[in-house]
Image (cartoon, rainbow, N blue to C red):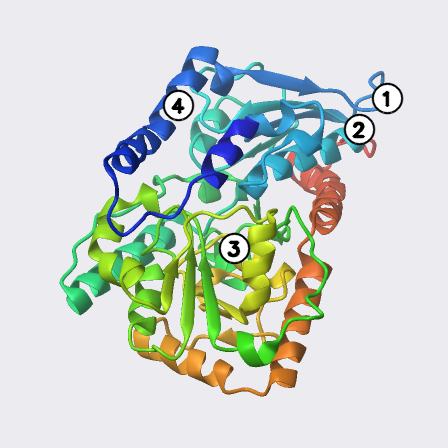
Amino acid sequence: MIYLSLIGNSLKPMPETPSLLHSAGAVVRRQVPLVRRLLRRVRGINERCITLHPPDASRPRGRVLLSYIIDGVLPRSEEDLPHSHPHFWETRAMADVFREEGYIVDVIHWTRRRALPRTDYDIFVDVRRNFERHAVALPDHCLKIAHMDTAHHRVHNGNQQQRLEALKARRGTRLDPFKLIEENQAAETADVITVLGNEFTIDTFAYAGKPVHRIRLSNPFTYPFPERKNFSEARRRFLWLGSEGFVHKGLDLVLDAFATLDDHELFVCGPLQNETAFTKAYHDLLYRTPHIHAEGWIDVQSPRFRKLADSCAAIVYPSCSEGGGGSVITMMHAGLIPVVSREASVDIDAACGLLLEQSSVAALQSAVRTLSAMAPDQLESMARAAWQRARDNHTRTRFKEDYRDFVKRLPEYLRAKRGPSTKEDAP
């Protein structure tokens, strides 16, 4: 599945007046997800089961069913995994932790439609979609864990709808919802919940009354701090970086905020060709505004990305709902100061960034002006604090440590679920 990352990272910014060839290319690119899904269905990838055995296969502690991203365990080496999304590596890391702790692990894809490969599981981990359907097929003593990589669907969907309505009121632009999360009862059905984000994400599941454990989101890369960055020049240069769902992730607000900030520069990094209705609505700001630069998708491992990050002071990311704020964390690793909403679900304080009081055009403009007016040495101090916080809390090593600590607590949950007759050496 390496080609998934390569396809996305090879896309170039859309020119102001697309040529016939470029237009044809855009049509082809829009078909890529459909072709990808068809290929997966033909190959049966989403219906497969990969079994991983513990180091001492003769004495397993129990059996785990992990329903997440099966692509994460298909390559022989983790170096072959795409870095376009952390869930590829995180699936592999979760399976490895269970295996290293003595469990047999069956890994399936979260969209699997077939019946389960077996039902005698001690632990079940799943993300939303199939949780209820699989849970009823499992024994009562099986510990059921909802691994929530987004905020609750009602918060995610409701907040996006509010943003779409606000956009219509502000500009008269009506856009359709994008990537809504299907309704589910995973939190209600689970015994335990894990989340990747901070208190914002955790709070969206508090109503379920289940134990919630935070597993801090990983990041595939760490970068050295940009010691040579000229903060006098960078302080008026800002960056927005995100994947699809531009209104959800606040790009409309950012563009409208920078429309009149013509003494500042904004660089927009994302798959712009994937949301043609949005780019049509914001065509003039994206492609005809001198101080706003539509960079398109960018590979965060590339020299182009490092050069751009080193030229900017901050990332602006007023998302309306996140499960961990991966884009922001990547930029903090690159030494950028975060200017974010609470809903971005990233731990921010005054030492390392600006937390928006509200996600509005006026609030963004105020935050941008506040940051760009700061002295260069203060900006460097904030950037270094953001960089250090990312390195301390959001690495692959930290994710695996958090998940191992969580797995080591599972025997007490299992004993509580099975009752006082459970043997001490049970998994």
Left or right, 336 with reference to 409: left
Viewer-nearest of discs 1 and 4: 4
Q: Which of marks 1 and 2 is nearer the N terminus?
A: 1
Disc nearer the start of the sequence (2/4): 4
Q: Name the residue under label 2.
A: 102
Asked if disc 1 and disc 2 are in contact, CB closer than 8 Å, the reply is yes
Residue at 58% across, 59% down = 307
Residue of label 3 = 327
User: Disc 4 marks which amino acid?
Assistant: Arg
**In the rendered image, which residue does mark 1 sit on?**
56
Tag in front: 2 or 4: 4
Which residue: 72% across, 41% down?
A: 407
Tell me the crowding category of disc 1: few under 14, some 14 to 19, or many 20 or more residues within 10 angstroms, Cα based: some
Residue appearing at x 71%, y 49% in the figure: 402
Compared across the picture, whether 8 is left or right of 144 comes to: left
- Identified by mark 2, the residue type is Gly
Q: Distance between the residues labelled 1 and 3?
A: 39 Å
Q: Looking at the image, which residue is at 26% across and 36% down? A: 23
How far apart in space, not on screen, are marks 3 and 2 (Cα)? 34 Å
Q: Are marks 3 and 2 in contact (CB under 8 Å)?
A: no
